[in-house]
Amino acid sequence: MSLDFIIAVLVTVISAATPLLLASTGELVVEKSGVLNLGVEGMMLTGAVIAAAVTLTTGSHLLALCCAALGGCAVALIFAVLTITLSASQVATGLALTIFGTGFSAMFGRPYTGQAVPLLYSPFPAELAGHPVWRLVFGHSSLAYFSVLMIVAVWWFLSRTRAGLVVRAVGENDLSAHSIGYSVAGVRYLAVSFGGLMAGIAGACYPLMLIPLWSERMTAGQGWIALSLVVFASWRPARLLGGAYLFGLLMAIQAYTKAGDSVFKAFPTEFITALPYLAAIVALVLISLRQRGGAAPACLGKPFIASG
Amino acid sequence: MQFRLEKRTQPSRMMVVIAPIAAVALTMLLGAAIFYLLGFNGAGAVREIFLTPLTNSYKWQDLAVKGTPLIIIGVGLAISYRANVWNIGAEGQYIVGALAGTGIALLTQNMSGPWILPLMLLGGVAGGAGYAAIPAFLRVRWGVNEILTTLMLAYVSVQLLFYLVFGPWKSPTSMGQPQTVMFSADQSLPYLIPGTIVQLGTPIALVVALVAWFLMSRSVFGYQVKVVGSAPQAARHGGFSASGTIWLALLVSGGLAGLAGILEAAGPVGRLVPQFPANYGFTAIIVAFLGRLHPLGVVLAAIVLAISFVGGEVAQTTIGLPSAAVGIFQAMMLFLLLAGDILVRYRLVRVTPRLLVEARI
Amino acid sequence: MADSAPRLSLRGITKRFPGVLANDDISFDVKPGEIHALLGENGAGKSTLVKMIYGIMHPDAGEMLWNGERVQIANPKAARRLGIGMVFQHFSLFEALTVLENIALGMDANIPQRELERRVRAVMAQYGLELEPHRTVSTLSVGERQRIEIVRALLLNPTLLIMDEPTSVLTPQEVEQLFVVLRQLAKKGCSILYISHKLQEIKALCDTATILRGGKLVDTCVPKIETSRSMAEKMIGGSLKTIKKPAMRDFGEERFIVNRLSMPALGHFDIALRDISFSVRAGEIFGIAGVAGNGQTALLLALSGEEPNAASDAISLGGEAIGALNAKARRLKGLASVPEERNGHAAVPDFTLSDNSVLTGRDRLGLAVSGLIRPRAARKYTADVIEAFAVKTSGAEAMAASLSGGNLQKYIMGREILQKPAVLVVSQPTWGVDAGAAAAIHQAIVDLAASGSAIIVISQDLDELLSLCDTLAVINEGRLSKPMKVSGADVEAIGLLMGGIHGEHAHKEELHHAVPA
């Protein structure tokens, strides 16, 4: 295997992992605050279709990303109102959000289906990425750098700042946080909104860096893989980074196999397509073997209504 | 004016019934408004999606066909959700049930007899239950969250279907089309009334709902499901096994989804094709919630959702509404139902405005 | 002017919840440097009142004056800014976080960690409170956890400290230590609002007592000149009932034997049971005392069969080994149990009482036959329980959640007792229950014993055990002490056992330290 090939694979790994990393970083914060938002897939599809539409109409990637983020955030707020203010079941509402996002994106994206979307390339000048090794450093889409930046920022926020401590406290014991005087609902609204912003940007990765067009259900269940990643990472940012790149590797294998360029070409393509989902199940089993539920925020998924 | 939520001492039985009806009604109103704002004929969309299937008697048969799998899967999911077991991958169990039943059909291709169809149906149940046994085992043995595993397995099942119909099970006479051979007469569901498209699946669905209703309201099995879902510690106190209940919930919901799958394959479709997954498994989640996790409620909810499916097709041809619009209506219905749910447990009371100022220092 | 004004003055405070008037026109003053008791039964409205003072809840009517000025306390932050600190009954701590993180969360200013640690250590040194700032809360004992709350409150230099039932989880020795700290604080001018229903403590500690009953203020008195009995009668609103218990009783055969029962910790924050042995005779009431969190929960689960123990012969009933049987099988053998948590453990809140009877009575009483439930039989049995135990409810079809704590507990006890169990294991039978219901429950336990059942009562309320039981043992860190006869038991010695000190020598030594002259 040549160096070029290895580097090409690594670049693919990083781009395939980027949306997973962005979405699961957002969900990590949401879950740390004690909320389980299963609607990641729906928020991602919303972000994806908005990013494609805005890029096609205005040509501005930055504007597209902002709109995708706000779109993800907007649908996340539907979830927040239902689960936080009205204390509806988080599982059911999350599922409804996914169904809604799927329907909305299909409907809204109809005029744009199949049109070529200009990709978002590396923020660095092309000459820098001339040599293969430098390509590994400078040759990624801006979104890939952004995703790594965000996971570091979230790690810092959760472990080093007072606001992060409050988020963890709310997820750990909502009653106590309330009785000390923190607004449980307020913290959770912010966390869910952040999750929505991140999922929207994660969705934008598909038309802007992976597949340069909009098509229905183009995220293909990756939102669910992002959810599994959070569990797999035991709610720790550092492990999330590793986990996302592990799945990126699987998807790179998939891409190369489909291109007929891999040692896995003996397997049926259907098996290769199913691989990330199977791997997600295996990952969940492995993490459960190591620890039984001890790492999850204690209030995850439980509704909270303040009295008085 | 300020409002506050106040917990009711008893959940309101009236609201349990009113909330879903209000959700459907509000969906029509809000839906009309939203689609109007999106530049469609909003009122027309609501009329075509929700009313035409009811007023046009020719569409009633379609409702029965579409409602059948929704009822069967929805009843299973309602039982599972009652037990707090979140099987959201019924779509996968539906597919694998169809695959298992089709496997039997392919094996019995050159045989005949009235035993073949029942065997296929049993195969469908076993396939669906077997596929749901994987998440059940993982949950009970290692505590792996079933929400994620059932869903992942749904994605996997689609690939399994593709692999089989594009590969080993592809009909030799299909001229390259990825599909299995047509099922023979002995392998297909009989028609209920000659000249209609309503098959044996529909009465089976109604029987399933009735049996489930009886079991859930009167049997120790139903009691176990409800008590484990409502208060797991109390269930343990009463001597019910949590893992046993997880197994039961997943096997029952998976088995019913599998039954729905083979009834669909041996009924309206008549063979397996790559387009076989029609989202019934996911829509049934909405059906289960809209039906208040009650088997008879599920029947009504399945009819409502079937109406929206049939109506969606009507609206596509008559007013050019995209098919995805139906999904938006369905999700809205679920959102509104969940929002209305709070009125079952809480009441809205007016509070006299009171000045809340920060303390002076 | 500010000096002569009361630190806190309540004027006509009223708070209504659905169905109850929790506080009805409450008015009283707390003077600077005063230790003021707020006395009342469970459900009298004490907690609601202090939650309003601390800004967690808001009154529907009435006003508060702080140092003579009218204030409205919007939230706990505002309360802290005024100088009000609070130590909660059910601690407001975060198990997975460290001591220091927990304290930081209670500070309103963002203090750098190192500076905070320095201040924490200073406060601890000043009041003789020992704590390791970097430990995770889940590894700490209940007493240590309370210290975190106290340190957190003291760091803000409060001028009013609210203590909500602070001693319910402490050993007698820890209580003494706490009192030393509180007296020290009061001497410096900090007012203390001390909530309790323990009369002895109030007599020992407090300058003034305000007594609440059913949400109303019934009296304000000076505890030192009152008798415990007079305060108790004001609190309960009638004369005290005493349990009718045959003075001399003969016990039957050894009905229930626990022999070297061990069980690993069930979860992260649980206690393992180690080598527990005791036996209970027919007609005997056996008490298990101990501070919360020392393995009581695990012991109840192990005895009831909810966590079946691997060793079959570790538990035997009437000579038959039942250690490997599950809860259902043990119930069929005649072992009934009542866990301490009513809502969601002993009963299903959103089921009807009738359905709740099916939970534990379906096999023994034939409420379910060949897989089908007999609703009529269940309703009949439930009606019997309601009648026999005077449960206040609209009937067998009422939701369990609609009953008050005391009535639900009466129903649950009745549901088990009317099944005439050979052995009854009950945890915290009167926790959070009003005095009337508590007396009825105690009487029912005594009567069941008189009819020949063996009874095990697990409780944190030592007074309850001393008045109820024939024999007593203490559980600490998952180990059970040697049983002792209640008549002639030494309360001081029991207290030391509860604190984990065994043997004569340690006994004297610790006693010396615990009660400074």
Image (cartoon, rainbow, N blue to C red):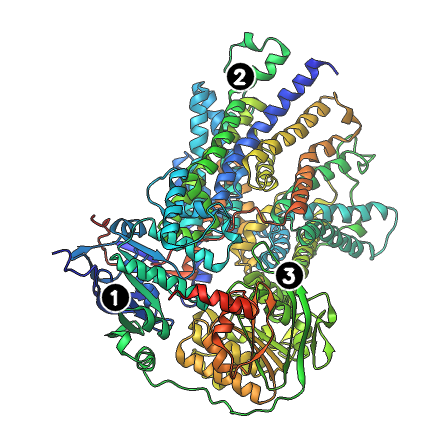
* Residue type indicated by callout 2: Tyr
- Say which of A295 and A259 sits in front: A295
Q: Which residue is mark 2?
A: A121
Left or right for A42, reference B121: left
The image quadrant of residue C213 is bottom left
A166 versus A21 height, above or below: below
SS of the residue under disc 2: loop
Q: Position of residue C391 (x, y in %)?
A: 45, 80
Q: Position of residue C356 (x, y in %)?
A: 54, 73
Tag 3 and tag 2 share a subunit: no
* Chain under callout 1: C
User: Which label was assigned to residue B242?
Assistant: 3
* Residue type indicated by callout 3: Ala
**Distance in Å between CA atoms under marks 1 and 2:** 65 Å
User: Which label was assigned to residue C14?
Assistant: 1
Contact check, label 1 and label 2, Cβ < 8 Å: no
